[in-house]
Image (cartoon, grey):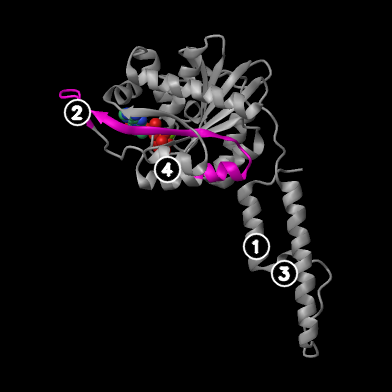
Amino acid sequence: MAQLTYSRLSHLLRISVNKPSALRTGTEIKHGAACCVQSKRCQRSVDSKALQERQKQIMAKGLPKQKPIAGVKQVIVVASGKGGVGKSTTAVNLALGLMANDSSKSVGLLDADVYGPSIPKLMNLKGNPELSDNNLMVPLTNYGIPCMSMGFLVEDVAPIVWRGLMVMSAIEKLLRQVDWGSLDYLVVDMPPGTGDVQLSITQNIPIAGAVIVSTPQDIALLDARRGAEMFKKVHVPVLGLVQNMSVFQCPNCRHQTHIFGSDGARQLADTLGVRLLGDVPLHLNIRETSDRGQPVVVSSPDSPEAEAYRKVASAVVQRLQEVNT
Ligand SMILES: Nc1ncnc2c1ncn2[C@@H]1O[C@H](COP(=O)(O)OP(=O)(O)OP(=O)(O)O)[C@@H](O)[C@H]1O
Ligand SMILES: [Mg+2]
């Protein structure tokens, strides 16, 4: 039986609202001059019952069953409603931070941003994944972290112009056709927004927790809140918020400036009743090392910036223990 995706489902539901006849059963009453108001009302109620029944059936068979990713113990998604707030940078340094804090843990990184994959650049990886004996894609590895991204499967500059079902099928491939071996944590870098990709992932695999990244700016916090509420709605535990780019320190005079505000994410965490997992400064070193494909946690492990990411990683592990008990 073909799985029904969220977009197909909402499409069907839309049809059902706009054109009820498309979903009618054979119980309709024929129209004609003799039809009285009473029979029209009656027809409407039959239609609406049939419609509700049909919608229930669609919902029941349409929602995919969650199935764990083979070999992966815990999936952590890094998300935010808004674009460009530092999800990918946080995801990469969180994965490296988890490993730096406890070298016995194996960590993988999945780039779920199929439109704008960043992981190949941030992890300095290029090339096509090989296939294992059982026809699964073998992740590319750097800094000890196996990574999978749509960026390994399409050309660097090729525009990714996919719609609905194609995106679902790409996500399905990334979730099911990768040989991760055995992982303690799989960190998933989400695309911006709260759309099809987010829903598809949350419906397909069990997620141990979501980390929401936001700058302290009102406009980013609004979307971060939407992101957190979405995860709550689909019963994914929100591990907490990471406040990114909260403070900039001038490298010359050491003066500190809160370009995007100072405390917005902390306040939002309080409002939502979730934890603030950490505060990452706006720092040239983070941007430069990211652009070089040498994330700050591995290239400047003694810097305060790397320390900030390691603190986020230990807060995430602590929260995972709390939500699992
Ligand atoms: N704390 C930071 N200090 C300095 N630069 C940062 C910091 N965090 C992220 N950046 C930079 O900000 C830009 C956006 O970061 P990133 O790509 O991680 O955001 P994103 O939320 O994943 O974006 P998108 O929504 O497009 O996927 C990048 O150039 C990155 O290097
Ligand atoms: Mg990104």
Residue at 58% across / 21% down in the picture?
A: 185
In the image, taking residue 168 as reference, residue 311 lies left or right, namely: left
Question: Is 155 above or below relative to 225?
Answer: above
- Per the image, the residue denoted by label 3 is 21
Say whether marks 2 and 4 touch (CB < 8 Å).
no
Label 4 C-beta lies within 8 Å of the nearest ligand 1 atom: yes
Measured as percent of width and height from the top left, residue 236 is found at 61, 37
Residue placed most toward the observer, 97 or 19 = 97
Which amino acid lies under the numbered mark 4 shown in the image of this protein? Lys
**In front: label 1 or label 4:** 4
Q: Which residue is mark 1?
A: 15
Amino acid at pointer 2? His
Q: What SS does tag 2 mark? A: loop
Q: Residue at x 82, y 78 (%)?
A: 29
Q: Secondary structure at mark 1?
A: helix
The type of residue carrying mark 3 is: Ser
